[in-house]
Amino acid sequence: MVFKILYIFSCTLNEKPYNLEKTITKDTLKNELFSGGRPAVEILFHRYGGMLFSYIQQFVPSRAEAEEQLVSIFARLAPRMESAFESSLSVYCWLQIEARKIILENRSNGHDLLSPQESSPAENEKKVYYFSLLEDASPEQQWVFKELFVEGRQREELALVLNRDAAYVGDVLRECMIIIRKKLA
Amino acid sequence: MYDHHQKKAGLNIQQYIASGIIESYVLGLASPDEGGQFERLLPFYPELQAAVSDFGFQVELFAIQHEAPPPSDAFYRIEDRLRELPAVIRHTGTGSHRKKENDYVSVRESSTHIRVHKYWRIAFIAVFILSKLLLIGFIYFLLQYRHAERDLRALQEHTNKTSLSPDTQGSDK
């Protein structure tokens, strides 16, 4: 709530329009879903399609493949929009999580798991979406985030490569999360 | 209730929030154990709900800043994909009261519009053009018929006149 107020205030000072009114709440979605008006998938696509399209591009750098993933995500989520109401997250955050699950399911070209020393991310990779928030993180932290978030690996797999336990990987991930939180704030 | 639960859990909620669990949960990176524990605690701690809401808001702002226009035909492709779906399947919630996953959604039709396959467009255009051609043909032949009828009448009148004229009567005699 504090962040929302600060954001609106900063937008007012800079005379910039803020996009809060575009946010789709669960109530809006529920009303549309049960009123027989525009289908929920249409509303969500027109509001969140662009946001989700750039989110997808951190998983699939090819634009053509990202387009295909975007279509696949909305087509697969359309019959189960009601799941958004059961989630404790906002509609957009729910959409992001479901999108990531679908992308990881769809993607078949997974590469072999290399150690942090062997797999340093390319410079252009470091600037993509959430990676841009981890520029100051250590190579190990970047590696853990990339393998867990983008590649969908299990903590146990990374622990084996690092010769540590899964709890250690969990700790590194938490450090990444704290960096992301600070950068976003 | 809330104090009781906090004491019982022996949990320092601020420390728990600072541990990065909110971010892991919102980004979908919490392990099943962490996620389960978080969801159990969430209803009892307004601080957790506020932290989830705040971080979700920041994530959405970040997404708005990085928004890229999707391809123009994407929504048509989604609609095409949805038409190909054999049936709409409802996925109900988790827990002991979970219903069968393959329950069909009961659809209540309230729209006055219908959707048809795109091949109907070609069929409609063909029928429309054909009907116009038939209409033009009908008007053309109607005019031709009227014209011929008028000519015929004129010819009959002319014949009648020539048969009744005195010259013809005289020559007959």
Image (cartoon, coloured by chain):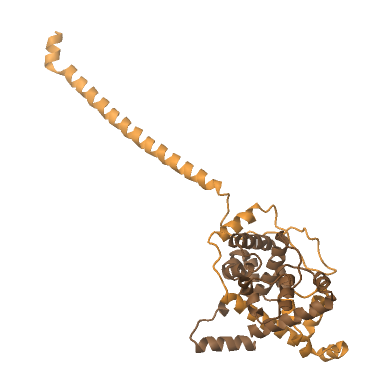
Q: Is residue B28 visible?
A: no
Report x, y in % for residue A171.
Answer: 79, 81
At 23% from the left and 23% from the top, the residue drawn is B155
Q: Residue furthest top?
A: B173
Q: Residue furthest front?
A: A118
Quadrant of residue B19 within the rendered picture = bottom right
At 55% from the left and 49% from the top, the residue drawn is B118
Chain depicted in brown: A
Q: Residue furthest right?
A: B8
Report x, y in % for residue B124.
Answer: 50, 45
From the viewer's side, name the closer residue of A15 and B133: A15
Q: Is residue B20 left or right of residue B81?
A: right
From the viewer's side, name the closer residue of B111 and A68: A68
Q: Is residue A119 left or right of residue B33?
A: left
Q: Is residue B27 above or below residue B164?
A: below
Numbered disc total: 0
Quadrant of residue B21 within the rendered picture = bottom right
Q: Is residue A93 visible?
A: yes
Q: Quadrant of the C terminus of chain A?
A: bottom right
At 66% from the left and 79% from the top, the residue drawn is A134
From the viewer's side, name the closer residue of A26 and A167: A167
Quadrant of residue B75 within the rendered picture = bottom right
Report x, y in % for residue B152.
Answer: 27, 25
Report x, y in % for residue A138.
Answer: 71, 80
Q: Quadrant of the N terminus of chain A?
A: bottom right
Q: Is residue A66 above or below residue B119?
A: below
Chain depicted in orange: B
